[in-house]
Image (cartoon, grey):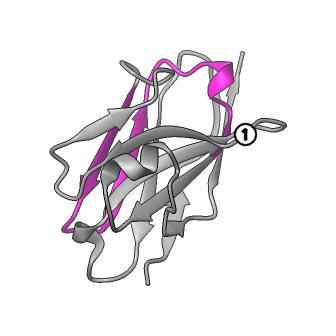
Amino acid sequence: QVQLVESGGGLVQAGGSMRLSCAASGRTFSTYAMGWFRQAPGKEREFVAAINWSGTSTYYADSGKGRFTISRDNAGNTLYLQMNSLKPEDTGVYLCVAHGHATTDIIGATNIEYWGQGTQVTVSS
């Protein structure tokens, strides 16, 4: 069992930066692929970024390429999402996920095992 708790959300102006964190419980954090999704009001949940268990492979949605960086600290059981040059369309609830199988499963939201509750990110124009 893995429990995920996100933090770091809030209100930021367009063009600003924000770093989200996801603290994971359990001793097997380093064996899970991890990722971030977001959901805006009235919109479907969408993939943002994913990272493999070792941190050597990362994947991004086109919307975040060049602006977002996903990383992980396996010793500290923490996942991060650094977001720069934020836009109003980045507004939404950001959810952390953990998946014990292929990292690419996260991109398609295929049978993802664990989800966090989310943290709200609001980007004002």
Pick whichever, 30 or 81, lies toward us.
Answer: 30
Q: Residue at x 62, y 53 (%)?
A: 119
Task: Indicate the position of residue 53 as horizontal and vertical percent values.
Answer: 22, 59
**Quarter assignment of residue 76:** bottom left
Q: Residue at x 27, y 83 (%)?
A: 27
Which residue reaches farthest right?
42
Task: Indicate the position of residue 41 as horizontal and vertical percent values.
Answer: 81, 38
Q: Residue at x 39, y 31 (%)?
A: 60
Residue denoted by label 1: 44
Q: Residue at x 42, y 39 (%)?
A: 49
Pick whichever, 107 or 81, lies toward us.
Answer: 107
How many residues crowd mark 1 within 10 Å: few (<14), some (14–19), many (20+)? few
SS under mark 1: loop
Q: Is residue 72 left or right of residue 118?
A: left
Q: Is residue 79 magenta?
A: yes
From where the camera sits, is residue 9 visible?
yes
Q: Is residue 39 left or right of residue 25?
A: right
Task: Indicate the position of residue 94 as horizontal and vertical percent values.
Answer: 59, 47
Pick whichever, 17 or 1, lies toward us.
Answer: 1
Image quarter in which the N terminus is found: bottom left
Q: Is residue 37 magenta?
A: no
Amino acid at the residue labelled 1: Glu
Instruction: Report the magenta residues as a range.
Output: 68-93
Q: Is residue 17 left or right of residue 75?
A: right
Image quarter in which the C terminus is found: top right
